[in-house]
Amino acid sequence: MPDRRGELSSVDGLAQLSFVVQGMLERRTAEWGLSMIQTRLLGVLRDRRPTMRELSQLLELDKSSITGLVDRAQARGMVERIPSSEDGRATIVVLTDEGHDAVSKVADAFERDIATLLARLTGADRRTLSELVSRLLVAHARAHGVDLFATVERDGAARG
Amino acid sequence: MPDRRGELSSVDGLAQLSFVVQGMLERRTAEWGLSMIQTRLLGVLRDRRPTMRELSQLLELDKSSITGLVDRAQARGMVERIPSSEDGRATIVVLTDEGHDAVSKVADAFERDIATLLARLTGADRRTLSELVSRLLVAHARAHGVDLFATVERDGAARG
DNA sequence: TATTGTTATACTCTATAACTATA
DNA sequence: TATAGTTATAGAGTATAACAATA
């Protein structure tokens, strides 16, 4: 491991950076009275109308956890439950206008935070960093059998 | 916003990267039967012997939350409570051997995960990324009045 | 029979308020 | 009086197991 004074190791740097970024997101969600998981829920509903079961897969939580999560979001007027017309057992969850508004505001504030963070680099450095991060994410996704730039499946097309 | 096909925006890239890294940490902590907050607790105890109050400041949690957190860690044999010899009201929390072992294993696995992730870049790209990330973190820390490379305060020196 | 979703239950995590012991 | 820590209480978030309704 090379000893570069005044510089973190690659591993530490990436770890610390992830904490900084996640900390920004947590502060913004808290600022809007949302928890991280509630924000994630609203986030995945921005461009999908999933069933409870699909939410369970998207958020990697047990279906019983999704019941409680959606209950609380619904009680706050952020989402609605709609009976599926295709399957009498299924329930579809959709964002209300209020929910859409809330998640958009959190997302906007968060994006501004990251933009501010990145603004501490010069334009050239920022472009280089952006390209390397992209390359890293694409390679990582590929290694896990995912194509980051595949056509996004939407509106119920996400069935397994 | 420049349209670079097959490349994420700087903002999206950094956000996604942070999710990938945090996901790795979460999987490793779960693998060892620990929650993220339990792992953070053990992590801060690796090089400190804080009081309950200091833990409250380090983890940014209410003192009553620390009581429960330490209770559960203690019940699992990860930490011990020691009465302070300096202040009859204070309690010092220390890692047991088992706790040290657990947090070391999580940290090692996590570091290997990040190293594996970084290994998807060439050596030259990795060095460039590392330098840019360091520069970003240092600038960010400085903007928040912190010197990342200041002498680390330890063993009770962390009083505010 | 299998699947979708909810309910019952239990545990972790968190905060607020009230309390005890010490300074 | 002020501070350190715990207890009582309440609520969010999570999982497992059992259940009802539908396929």
Image (cartoon, coloured by chain):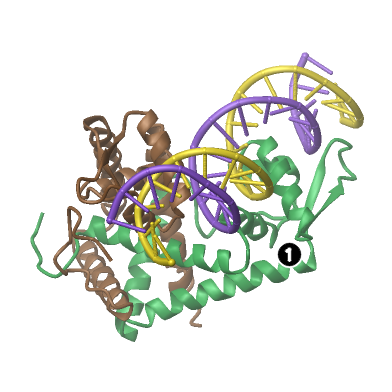
Chain colours: A brown, B green, C yellow, D purple
Residue A6, visible in the rendered structure: no
Q: Amino acid at mark 1?
A: Gly
Where residue A158 appears, as percent x and y from the top left, is 23, 61
Which residue corresponds to the image point at 41% horizontal and 36% vertical from the top-left?
A71
Residue at numbered disc 1: B99
Chain identifier of the residue bearing label 1 in the image: B
> Is residue B63 depicted above or below B22 in this figure?
above
Where residue A62 appears, as percent x and y from the top left, is 46, 55
Q: Is residue A40 left or right of residue B157?
A: left
* Count of numbered labels shown in the rendering: 1
Q: State the quadrant of the C terminus of chain A.
A: bottom left
SS at mark 1? Answer: helix
Q: Quadrant of residue A31?
A: top left
Which residue corresponds to the image point at 47% horizontal and 48% vertical from the top-left?
A65
Where residue C8 appears, as percent x and y from the top left, is 60, 39
Judging depth in this view, the residue of D17 and A125 nearest the camera is: D17
> Is residue B30 depicted above or below B71 in this figure?
below
Judging depth in this view, the residue of A71 and A37 nearest the camera is: A71
> Is residue A66 depicted above or below B99 in this figure?
above
Where residue B56 appears, as percent x and y from the top left, is 66, 41
